[in-house]
Amino acid sequence: MKAFYELRKDNFFVGPMTEYPFPLHVHETVEMAIVLTGECTMQIDGREYVLHPGDAAIAFPLTPHAYMTQSEGTKGFTAIFPADTIAEFSGIFHTMLPNEPIVHRERVGEEALRMAETLQQGHANQHLHLAYLHVILAHILHALSFHSAAAYNERGLGARVVRYVYDHACDSITISSAAHDLGISESHLSHLFAQQFHVNFRAFINAIRIDKATMLMRDPFLTLTQIYYQCGYDNMRTFRRAFVQETGVLPAAYMRAARRGGAESVSRPMEKAETMILPD
């Protein structure tokens, strides 16, 4: 399964849960989902969970998670927000991790479910978003048990690493140069990718480059040669191989579709945020 690091343009969102499967991803914000009707299978930190109506799931910052399958008619509420949004809970998000990220309906509580439904339907005004989120979180966090995030410094380093690599992926970057600039050893950097993101450094770089290529392909004035050079590739053969591996489509076919306005038929449904793809 593919995973991606999501650089969200809007770090605060409350509203409907995605209506289609959304692949494995991580971001620096908290993500909470509550199923209101139907069923949804989620993967959080390597484990799968089936959520029934009234069940809630929460992914702490930099925890890989995905919406995998949904039954027909599934509706739900999602909140995505920075760990410091509500000061009362920021210490938990910064220093702890849940033993199990799922809370079942009886412990979520009817009050929290009513508020989630109001937010999902868009009936609450913006002034109530934070207040309702506060109450919902109070119910969910109270129902969870936690353990100390002993490796939280590593999680913070992970965020710094991916931001650095994202900025330099299309340069002549190597694991040695990245480790030097980040002030850590190559072995430490390699271990971080393997343990925290379950991907090797080179695959991480290629995925970011191909994601950038798909964006550049929308520009009608760029040739494929210009695009692959801008994305850090030296030749078409290497670029084509990496592109097909990431998208399943030849770059020329993808570019034609993108320029006809039909790239959605061959690309990932991820227009809500800027992303970087991390193949597992």
Image (tube, helix red, strand yellow):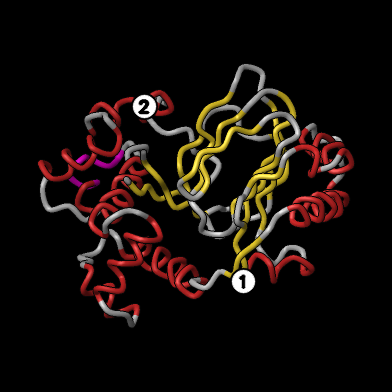
Q: Which mark is residue 95?
A: 1
- Residue 275: x and y in percent read 45, 49
In the image, farthest residue toward the top: 72
Q: Residue at x 81, y 49 (%)?
A: 136
Residue 222 falls inside the magenta stretch: yes
Q: Is residue 17 left or right of residue 142?
A: left
Q: Which mark is residue 47?
A: none
Q: Secondary structure at mark 2?
A: loop
Number of residues whose C-alpha sits closer than 10 Å to that of mark 2, classed few (under 14), some (14–19) or many (20 or more): some
Q: Earlier in the sequence, mark 1 or mark 2?
A: 1
Q: Residue at x 30, y 48 (%)?
A: 207
Q: Quadrant of the N terminus?
A: top left
- Residue 66: x and y in percent read 51, 40
- Residue 86: x and y in percent read 77, 64
Q: Secondary structure at mark 1?
A: helix
Question: Quick one: 176 or 167, which is closer to the camera?
Answer: 176
Q: Is residue 49 left or right of residue 163?
A: right
Residue 147 falls inside the magenta stretch: no
Q: Quadrant of residue 148?
A: bottom right
- Residue 183: x and y in percent read 33, 82
> CB of mark 1 within 8 Å of CB of mark 2?
no
- Kind of residue sitting beneath label 1: Thr
Question: Quick one: 5 or 138, which is closer to the camera?
Answer: 138
- Kind of residue sitting beneath label 2: Val
Residue designated by label 2 = 266
Number of residues whose C-alpha sits closer than 10 Å to that of mark 1, classed few (under 14), some (14–19) or many (20 or more): some
| Whole-number angstrom distance, CA of label 1 to CA of label 2 | 40 Å
Residue bounds of the magenta highlight: 221-227
In the depicted structure, whether residue 35 falls above or below residue 193: above
